[in-house]
Image (cartoon, rainbow, N blue to C red):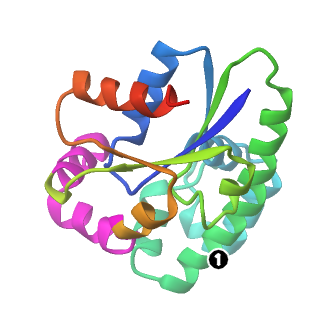
Amino acid sequence: MRVIGITGSSGSGKTTVCEIIKKLYNSEVLDADKVAKELSSDINSNYYKEMVKLFGEECVLENKLLNRRKIAEIIYQDDIKRKSLNDLTFNYVVEKIKKDLSEIKDKELVIIDAPLLYEAGVDKICDKVIAIIADKNNKVRRICLRDGIDEVFAKKRLLIQNEDDFYIKKADYIIYNNKDIKELEESIKKVLEEK
């Protein structure tokens, strides 16, 4: 079983790449963002309690769930809060990913989809890391479509993330995701089937 890390900035198309890999190969995808969402939605989890402590009761909705939009607004403006959130998330999410990984037995590939893969140290448990790179206009368009936000907010989001060069320098492989799905599939096959 090979463990492949998939990383890149928001809007680069990591989820699309993971979906293609799932379709083409006997694989399992561990999505760091989904893990974080699940943990923060469990009001009895330590992660949820730490989030409430970090952001305050004003970030809790009437139904007790976290107000993700409000938290997003805070972390895009406050570097200290963003770093605290990342540190907190790394602890809980990495622990859960490692646990989930240890329970997978019958897959040829396990994909770990993590935008902050290097920062969280998840690259150390990967055999290879693939960075997904896309041009800025594509990223902005995808973020707006996916999250229902305007271009200004999407661009602000990208400003606080790593530049493409960060991923290009660190990753074992680069996949450019600016064209059609067929071309993307071919790029994925080329990387994953390289001997």
Q: Residue at x 34, y 41 (%)?
A: 13
- Does 172 appear above or below 152? above
Q: Residue at x 47, y 73 (%)?
A: 75
What secondary structure is the magenta-colored segment mainly? helix
Q: Which residues are magenta?
A: 138-164
Q: Report helix, strand or loop for mark 1.
A: helix
What residue type is disc 1 on?
Ser
Q: Is residue 36 visible?
A: yes
- Does 105 appear above or below 62? above
Question: What residue would you read off at disc 1?
Answer: 84
Nearest to the observer: residue 4 or residue 14: 4
Where's residue 136, x and y in %? 19, 59
Q: Residue at x 65, y 42 (%)?
A: 35
- Does 89 appear above or below 134? below
Where's residue 33, x and y in %? 56, 46
Where's residue 176, x and y in %? 28, 45
Q: Residue at x 85, y 33 (%)?
A: 102
Where's residue 169, x and y in %? 44, 66
